[in-house]
Image (cartoon, rainbow, N blue to C red):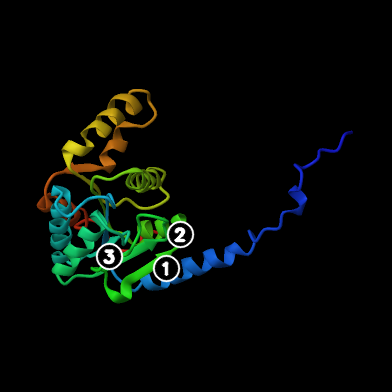
Amino acid sequence: MRKEKHPKGWNEIKTNDSWAIFKIMGEFVNGFEKMSAIGPCVTIFGSARTKQENEYYELTVNIARKIAEAGYGIITGGGPGIMEAGNRGAHLAGGTSVGLNIDLPFEQHDNPYIDDDKSLDFDYFFVRKVMFVKYSQGFVVMPGGFGTLDELFEAITLIQTNKIGRFPIILVGSRFWKGLIDWIKETMLGAGNISAGDLDLIRIVDSAEEVVELIDAFYKGHTLSPNF
């Protein structure tokens, strides 16, 4: 029997893959210890590229301010754009303002509206996403790009498969989200790849008042606690 050979030099490659687990564990431990002390929060997602003059930046500031006034902290990805607007709104309301920063080559830098003791830095997207899901009592999803969609659909999937408890997932901006929702209904649901009940996991609104009403209504019948 012929012995299969590895590509040239394969067995000469030295890696530190096994040791990376300690860095990953360190990020989890640091994140769990800091986030567990913060209390009920709502995460706001959206594009890092949104400028201050954009209507959704101003809307995000207003949404975050009203959520903070309702007694929740605000968590964002810590960067510019919609993330900055979310932290800014929390800051204006005197509420808890958390930033979960990720090391990226071009876009990411922490914004000035994060509380000094609540800015966490991550190298690993998957560790950071665990923190969002575990310590958020709701997701408010503003217009964004691939990263925003990634975080949105991961949350929907985890709830749909009962890996975490249900919490409000609110899409803001019906004009922006309409095409995606129409496609989900017509194509995904039409093909039988999701059930009609899965559509109930998300709500679409256009105002800050509607966001707070949905969150408050949900927690009249649910306990505020970490999600797993």
- Residue 185 on image: x %, y %: 28, 28
Q: Which residue is mark 2?
A: 127
Q: Which residue is mark 3?
A: 111
In the picture, measured across the screen, residue 222 lies left or right of residue 94, that is right
Query: What's the CA distance linking mark 3 and mark 1?
Result: 19 Å
Q: Earlier in the sequence, mark 3 or mark 1?
A: 1
Label 3 crowd bin: few (<14), some (14–19), many (20+), radius 10 Å? some
Instruction: Tell me, yes or no, whether the two marked residues, 2 and 1, touch with CB atoms within 8 Å.
Output: yes
Query: What's the CA distance linking mark 3 and mark 2?
Result: 20 Å
- Residue 130 on image: x %, y %: 42, 58
Q: Which residue is mark 1?
A: 31
Which image quadrant is residue 149 in?
A: top left
Give the residue at the far right of this rendering.
1
**Any mark on residue 120, and which?**
none
Q: Which is nearer the eye, 22 or 109?
A: 109
> Looking at the picture, which amino acid does disc 2 mark?
Val
